[in-house]
Image: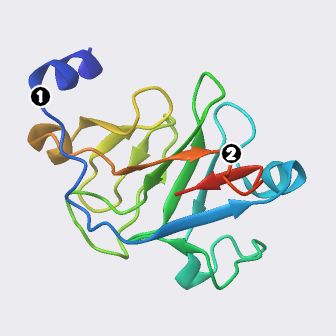
Amino acid sequence: MAIAMAAGACHHLDDERVPLLRVWLSFNFQADWTRYGTPAAGDARLFVKSTLTPPDYPYTALESTGFGGLLLVCDVMGNPKAFCAACPVEVKQDVLVFINDDNHAECPHCHSIFDVFSLDGVPIAGRAADEGWSLRRYSVGPGDRGEYMLVR
């Protein structure tokens, strides 16, 4: 019910509140994607280069994780999706959404809730839903230069 109300209440969702900074995360081989990515429906992983999150990911000098890091997920249909992890209400590099017990992305400060597994980062509760501020999306797919999976 909350999802239908949130989606119906907003005529336009704004996913540009968070500054657009360079995003580039490369998984060169299927084994890299399986180990570090989100290969199965419901998987989620946070990437923040400045804090080396996750600590075992081999970041290169070319890779960037945007303004607040990347929240990489695999949606309910098995498709990889990527979002800026910074809350669009707070717009701070160190206020990052997390996956809560209900499998939604939640801001630890304003407690806005976003559906990242079936509604592409649409806000479903909290101030973000009231204002129509969704998570910024990035593209995920095979790379142009032979990368198995690329986030940009």
The residue depicted at 18 percent of the width and 37 percent of the height is 13
Cα separation, mark 1 vs mark 2, equals 32 Å
For residue 7, side relative to residue 38 (left or right) = left
Residue 109 sits in which quadrant?
bottom left
The residue identified by callout 1 is: 10
Q: Position of residue 46 (x, y in %)?
A: 58, 60
- Crowding around mark 1 (Cα neighbors within 10 Å: few <14, some 14 to 19, many 20+) is some
Q: Position of residue 65 (x, y in %)?
A: 51, 70
Split into 4 quadrants, where in the image is the N terminus? top left
With respect to residue 54, does 89 lie above or below?
A: above
With respect to residue 106, does 88 lie above or below?
A: below
Q: Are marks 1 and 2 in contact (CB under 8 Å)?
A: no
Using the image, tell me which numbered label, if any, was put on residue 30.
none
The residue depicted at 63 percent of the width and 73 percent of the height is 53
Viewer-side residue, 69 vs 101: 69
For residue 46, side relative to residue 126 (left or right) = right
Residue extending farthest to the front is 145
Q: Position of residue 112 (x, y in %)?
A: 27, 47
Q: Position of residue 83 (x, y in %)?
A: 44, 51
For residue 55, side relative to residue 17 (left or right) = right
Using the image, tell me which numbered label, if any, was put on residue 142.
2
Classify mark 2: helix, strand or loop: loop
Between disc 1 and disc 2, the foreground one is 2
Amino acid under label 2?
A: Pro
